[in-house]
Amino acid sequence: MADRFHSISPIDYRYWDEEIARYLSEGAFIQYKLQVEFALIQTLAQLELCPPGVEKEVAQAITEITPDEVFEEEGKVKHDIRALVNCIRKRVSDKAKPFVHMTATSCDISDTANAARFREATMHVLVPRLLELQKVLIAIALREADSVQIGRTHGQHAVPITFGFAIGEYVARLGESIKKLQELADHLPGKFAGAVGAYNASSLLIDDPEEFEKEVLFRLKLRPASHSTQIVVPEPMMRLLSEVGIVGGVMANLSRDMRHLQRTEISEVEEEFSEEQVGSSTMPHKRNPIAFENIESLWKVLVGRLSTVYFDQVSEHQRDLTGSASQRTYGEIIGYASYMTKRLKETMEKLCINHENLKRNLELSKGAVLAEPLYILLAHFGYPDAHEKVRQLALKAKQEDKPLSEVVEQDEEIRPYLEKMTSEQRNIISHPAAYTGLAAQKARKVAEYWKNALGL
Amino acid sequence: MADRFHSISPIDYRYWDEEIARYLSEGAFIQYKLQVEFALIQTLAQLELCPPGVEKEVAQAITEITPDEVFEEEGKVKHDIRALVNCIRKRVSDKAKPFVHMTATSCDISDTANAARFREATMHVLVPRLLELQKVLIAIALREADSVQIGRTHGQHAVPITFGFAIGEYVARLGESIKKLQELADHLPGKFAGAVGAYNASSLLIDDPEEFEKEVLFRLKLRPASHSTQIVVPEPMMRLLSEVGIVGGVMANLSRDMRHLQRTEISEVEEEFSEEQVGSSTMPHKRNPIAFENIESLWKVLVGRLSTVYFDQVSEHQRDLTGSASQRTYGEIIGYASYMTKRLKETMEKLCINHENLKRNLELSKGAVLAEPLYILLAHFGYPDAHEKVRQLALKAKQEDKPLSEVVEQDEEIRPYLEKMTSEQRNIISHPAAYTGLAAQKARKVAEYWKNALGL
Amino acid sequence: MADRFHSISPIDYRYWDEEIARYLSEGAFIQYKLQVEFALIQTLAQLELCPPGVEKEVAQAITEITPDEVFEEEGKVKHDIRALVNCIRKRVSDKAKPFVHMTATSCDISDTANAARFREATMHVLVPRLLELQKVLIAIALREADSVQIGRTHGQHAVPITFGFAIGEYVARLGESIKKLQELADHLPGKFAGAVGAYNASSLLIDDPEEFEKEVLFRLKLRPASHSTQIVVPEPMMRLLSEVGIVGGVMANLSRDMRHLQRTEISEVEEEFSEEQVGSSTMPHKRNPIAFENIESLWKVLVGRLSTVYFDQVSEHQRDLTGSASQRTYGEIIGYASYMTKRLKETMEKLCINHENLKRNLELSKGAVLAEPLYILLAHFGYPDAHEKVRQLALKAKQEDKPLSEVVEQDEEIRPYLEKMTSEQRNIISHPAAYTGLAAQKARKVAEYWKNALGL
Amino acid sequence: MADRFHSISPIDYRYWDEEIARYLSEGAFIQYKLQVEFALIQTLAQLELCPPGVEKEVAQAITEITPDEVFEEEGKVKHDIRALVNCIRKRVSDKAKPFVHMTATSCDISDTANAARFREATMHVLVPRLLELQKVLIAIALREADSVQIGRTHGQHAVPITFGFAIGEYVARLGESIKKLQELADHLPGKFAGAVGAYNASSLLIDDPEEFEKEVLFRLKLRPASHSTQIVVPEPMMRLLSEVGIVGGVMANLSRDMRHLQRTEISEVEEEFSEEQVGSSTMPHKRNPIAFENIESLWKVLVGRLSTVYFDQVSEHQRDLTGSASQRTYGEIIGYASYMTKRLKETMEKLCINHENLKRNLELSKGAVLAEPLYILLAHFGYPDAHEKVRQLALKAKQEDKPLSEVVEQDEEIRPYLEKMTSEQRNIISHPAAYTGLAAQKARKVAEYWKNALGL
């Protein structure tokens, strides 16, 4: 392949970035596998199971090996790990040769390398980006804690909230997911238990093969699972990738909300639009929520991938290889999620909020949204069938195109109940902006909680 | 519908059971919703927000309400929760009426009822059944800890393990999943935060609406999420259902292994077959692994359902209803998993293990499986290119149809290395049954660990 | 199970209907299987392969058999088809007994019964309902062919269309899908090829077993596949169910559009709301697009199910049973789709279109939507960089909150080009309602085409 | 990106090939879009809607444009099609400029380019490869039409078939799918209907915009859909990609069968293994079915992708962009399928069939597989409860470890019925190899049919 334009997957041209590739490219995978082979040698050296000098030889060898060379060798032996091992072996002395890959099965190397790189891609790329996004959301939640907005259920005006409260929802959901991702990435197990997981080979030479496994993995910041076959148990990786899908869904939901708030008729927010940017190749006036749409679109990519992950769970007996090719696509899941996060952060950072339109929309339904407090207070003051009564009044207001409060005032039956209300209560039932409950307070509380919990 | 044969879903005739229906049927859902309405009244009473006697009236009312009645009312008002509320209200005094459902939005009731019943279905049906299954598996792992079996990778003979070790894998995977299920079910949040999650309505009447929410939920053994909209955040339920899918995959994997071990040519295990049972309507000799096949089949049902769950995550603004109908199918996920567990437990309990065939198969490949220890030991004793050497010998043995050990003995080049080996090592490279590494030990360790960890 | 409230799946209480159950319930399945057994006997009789009288005996027997009886027998023999056969056999004379199920394997019966009932459920329920829906859409497309509406891309005002044109899109998409469903349902193959598909058993007794197979299937309005194993090839069913998913997506797309057009700020359409209907248990003013939301929700159920269908495609060798339990859920796919269709038809039939708001929204963006024709005409009359010029003007109009046409008129540079335009062209660039292209014409054309093509 | 090892998706390093990239890479996409822009100019020229010479200018321009240049321009204008248009425009005279992209909306270009390249990738890569595979399978079916093999259901020995018959199944399934792929690829619609599908822009300048659309598309071997919005209707692409998933499933099923037949205990087939090939990095004796496993694995990738395709179906109003990023991954579906096909063809071509083991396995169950013909013939000759009788005899044979025929001969009750049988019938019930029904005949028939139908 000559350049990126020969790529078929958009993760390799349009959504590719250096930082992700450092962990998740094929080249990176080869590097990680070399590190695992080296951790094995180091452990053998430490336990004096190999002669002095071998460690140094291997350390040197792995710096020299290129992906090209490994692929070329694989072309011959048709086995990726054996190819890698051959590349090391041909660089070291005959004395050192037998210790390269000693007692290891291929999956000891590749599953462990995968655990290491998925752990680090999550901890060093995805999570840091999510924290950056979280910072932006927290700032909005705090800044807009008091900006009254009509709450919407079913796309219909419900009762008021504040914009900060709406963002607070995402702060809370994202916060939980970040915590889960950290835990799950940190618990991806590696393995060094041999061809069927029973330490058959290492038992030949090593007194405590389980302890040996721990040592090798410790050098890679990993731990063993409590039981392995030829492969590491799939569930920890499944849980991590599921959570990546989940955090993608949280971002998609926020994006969905934002792009609807950008609808021409609503116009409460707008993606920043640069001077030179073109909205449409034929409609010069267009301003489209393309970043939000992009994020929602990539979420659908993530979820589709999870089907594959779930169907890969079953591996026959001590393993079959029917999950091997498909597993090679797992890095894309973290790659797409990292891209989405970065893009969403940049978009939210520059989000324009139109406070005038927030207000305009709040007033649009002429106080119909006050039907709820009215019904609650009527009920509280003893009106027997308050919900039905208010439903009738709201209907009437709608039919006569009048503010609800006007219809209410003209209703004889209700008057005595209005008189029982405090002035604050009476204020609420005629001023939508006053009926926001704990919205502002909750926006601040959630923002502060996650600021602390995540050390932002 | 007159009887179960009018059912379209197999969960309602073939795989239905009383115990699951107690939590997950439509009737059960209505009961749970009534319990939530009652918890609200109890809390109002405790805080003296409703007059004495109301609690008792409502307590009585909810015992009388039938699903039929609620559905009939829904037919009129086209709203399931309003229908429920009407059914309560028409049974209580005018004095009590206003307090029924006071400040609640529909989802306060239904999302909370769902959290409660999914929590209980998991804790009282699925997890107990999984523990029963786990007990059976632990018993097999211990009993068969020393029964040598050939390990298989890619369907090919690899190196030996023991049958108990193979089952130990599932003990470990199941154990982890049970623990996760317990945690996740125990953390399903409820909510009582009103129409858009900002406690708008409850703020009108109650000093500390968040505290009030906690009280109501506490009565149902639930806690609030840190932020709600009209609905509870979807992620905790997604995580629970994902884990149900995962535990289904663990069972499917075990079933897949078992049914292949039952292949005519392998015959290491057999599902118990009752006296009168028919294997095929046309082939009177057939003994099919139908329980294992059934479990694998239902796993595919589970995983398909997860796609729906993941796509339901996005709900617009303070909620839309596009997840409502699909959510009604979530109970089936726990229902199918519970059925699978019960069936797998019964099947494993009566599993016939054919020890003769274990032995026969182990010896089938004439010691070719000893290529690994041979290569490791040769390498250990300094043979420079041991893997390639042994690959050649194995090829030769295969071509000449001889035991590998015979070919090895006749090889001049290798002899000096053989002489360096201990007698134990020499024993291993000619006796497959001796080359099981830590298999037996690990089977016991894993079994004992999970016995304790799960209190079995 | 005592009543429908013990059901776990909503397809068996909330979305169940008699008409669907006639084909897709467990009881119906048993009836279909009996019909297949009878078609076998009829064919044997016709070929004089069984004595006179047997046909009559079996005809009588199958009228008497109840699902309950079959399930009870299955409880004993653990085999659904053998149970069915036993129920027939015990009702007929010893002379007739051997001919019941003669040469058939279980899947000859059950796969053929499935083909027959899925074919008929599609042809007699789903397709007729889709045609009813199509009629309603065609009527709207014709009636509203000239009702100008702003076209929307990315939720932003684009250029104008008509409401009839927007509905025309769905007429076209639905029309194609109906045709496909008819074809696919009509080509579901049955089979009568025995235990492994090689006609082993029937070859023992019958001269031309392939001809025999055709005869049996012909009685059920089916044809054989060109090759079977124990089971019918899965692809024809997969294609049918995929198309059911696709038609569900067309309905979901229409529903999504409609519910957004019902947003408070847009209000171009409204689901009919009955007198007594309640929109929210706490917000008496709410009018929610619940039918549209329901349909979108059930679409997500459909798509999740397709994952299962696709993963069921692989059956080992001449078949395994890992698709058996999951296949029992396929009827639900047609069931849900049929429910969705009925509901969507009822909803569209009563849809309220608010023509005033169509007009209000069209005028909302002050002619910005005319940027496109302006740019096209400028380009046509030779303005070199028309798109960029108009982009600048549109930006200016937006910033100064003026109609685009006003900004245009004041632009010196453009004036000479305006003068070259015809009066019709000039009219278009200042009147959004005139810039609808072929919208009206296309609405009529599509409606008429499908009216004829489907014989409506 | 410097080289392929920076790629994250395996489709861009491990499974990439030149031939696929010619249609499905990003570079290819840009080329196709340029072709569409050119087809527009050609059509304008033909209708004399642009001055002489413009066609030539544009023809020259598009040969010069590189993907790099387009991406750089997109970096500025943030719009992929506008970037492309700018790259053309800056190369042509002021006279020509206005005609570039005239009346087109971006999706007229990109959706049409996608239709063209997906059509050609299917017709020029995937289908030809499938035909190559089909040839190989047909050859095996014919060559092995008479090689008796035990049929297997549920992994258990059922009744005999022939190896050619087993392969014939895949010839039939593959044949149907190839035909569907050809039809579906050939019907992918393009569009040239403008920003919302109503030909608003083209109506300004062109008398019959629908005819104009047809002309443009005709140059690209495409046709319009009967109705478009801003985008082409999604269903034709969904149907094509679904069928690609289906053909992948057929290949996965064949691969699954083959890899199980390669199990050590069965060994009826073996993937060819090259001289230098290594089976395992630690077990020198291993011969793994890695190609079959790889194909099954990639099938799981395909099916996961279909979830995304199905969820992309819904696009709001005249389109939103939430399917845009995800659609960029669709090419991978065809790419993976093409890779799978090539690999499967190469593997099947060199498949080693072990006829001795076919025979050994056939005899393994000591004639138990003859229970079926025995029961059928007993029934035929009037034995009243033949199935139950034979079930008992088979059980007895198994318990006593005797050939079924031996137990049968010793049974007094049966003797009179045996005497009624023809010698051929008696032969069958003691010789499994004789009981293959139409297997051989059917293998040939299916092979010949598809040879003709596909012109092979």
Image (cartoon, coloured by chain):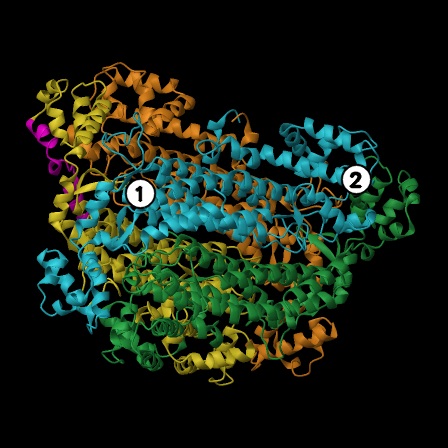
Chain colours: A yellow, B orange, C cyan, D green
Q: Residue at x 27, y 81 (%)?
A: D91
Q: Secondary structure at mark 2?
A: helix
Vertical arrangement, residue C391 with respect to residue A368, above or below: below
Vertical arrangement, residue A98 with respect to residue D260, above or below: below
| Mark 1, other Cα within 10 Å: few <14 / some 14–19 / many ≥20 | many
Residues C423 and D63: in front is: C423
Q: Can you tell which quarter of the image residue A454 is in? A: bottom left
Vertical arrangement, residue C41 with respect to residue A267, above or below: above
Pinpoint residue B165: horizontal percent, then vertical percent: 57, 54
Residue A321 in view in this figure: no
The disc label shown at residue C259, or none: 1
Residue D251 in view in this figure: yes
Q: Which residue is mark 2?
A: C46
Residue closest to the far front: C423
Q: What amino acid does circle 2 point to? A: Gln
Q: Are marks 2 and 1 in contact (CB under 8 Å)?
A: no
